[in-house]
Amino acid sequence: MKVITIKQPWASLIAEGIKEYEFRTWKTKYRGDILIHAGKGIDKKAMKKFECYNLDYPSGCIIAKATLTDCILVDEESRKMLNRKNPLVYSNIINDLNWKGYGFKLENVEKVKPIDINGKLSLWNYDYKD
């Protein structure tokens, strides 16, 4: 199964269903099931920003399964849509008009029993058994 490695707190925000889009500078044609891997990297500024959610932030493990259903270009219209959805979670993308990239739409998110494994760049494969 495909896996995407994401820094904390973003991985946990996705696992909890709070964040629906993951952002990259590259697009993907892949659609289907994907595992969410919480990388060992931490966005310290964002961790402070999201203290209000009082979440667990495991690292170095797969923490959720989702369905990647779309890959959208981040433009003026998508920034407006993200602002309507959750201005706190998406403020980095909404406010940085110079950032160019894509949003991977994640649906049907389910937490899984954590699986300790090192992450990788881009989308990578893991032999996952439900």
Image (tube, helix red, strand yellow):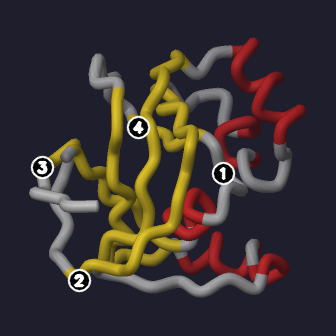
Residues marked 1 and 4 touching at CB (< 8 Å): no
Q: Earlier in the sequence, mark 3 or mark 1?
A: 1
Q: Which residue is mark 4?
A: 24
Q: Secondary structure at mark 1?
A: loop
Q: Badge 4 local density, few (<14 within 10 Å), some, or many (20+)?
A: some
Q: Disc 2 marks which amino acid?
A: Asp
Whether residue 98 is situated above or below residue 130 in the rendered picture: above
Residues marked 3 and 4 touching at CB (< 8 Å): no
Q: Secondary structure at mark 2?
A: strand
Q: Which residue is mark 3?
A: 125
Q: Nearer the viewer, residue 110 or 79?
A: 110
Q: Earlier in the sequence, mark 3 or mark 4?
A: 4
Quadrant housing the C terminus: bottom left
Q: Which residue is mark 1?
A: 19
Q: Disc 1 marks which amino acid?
A: Lys
Across and down, in percent, residue 94 comes to 74, 36
Q: Is residue 93 left or right of residue 26?
A: right
Q: Which residue is mark 2?
A: 116
Residues marked 3 and 1 touching at CB (< 8 Å): no
Across and down, in percent, residue 58 comes to 45, 85
Q: Which is closer to the viewer, label 2 or label 4? A: 2
Q: Which is closer to the viewer, label 1 or label 4? A: 1
Question: In which quarter of the view is residue 114 placed?
Answer: bottom left
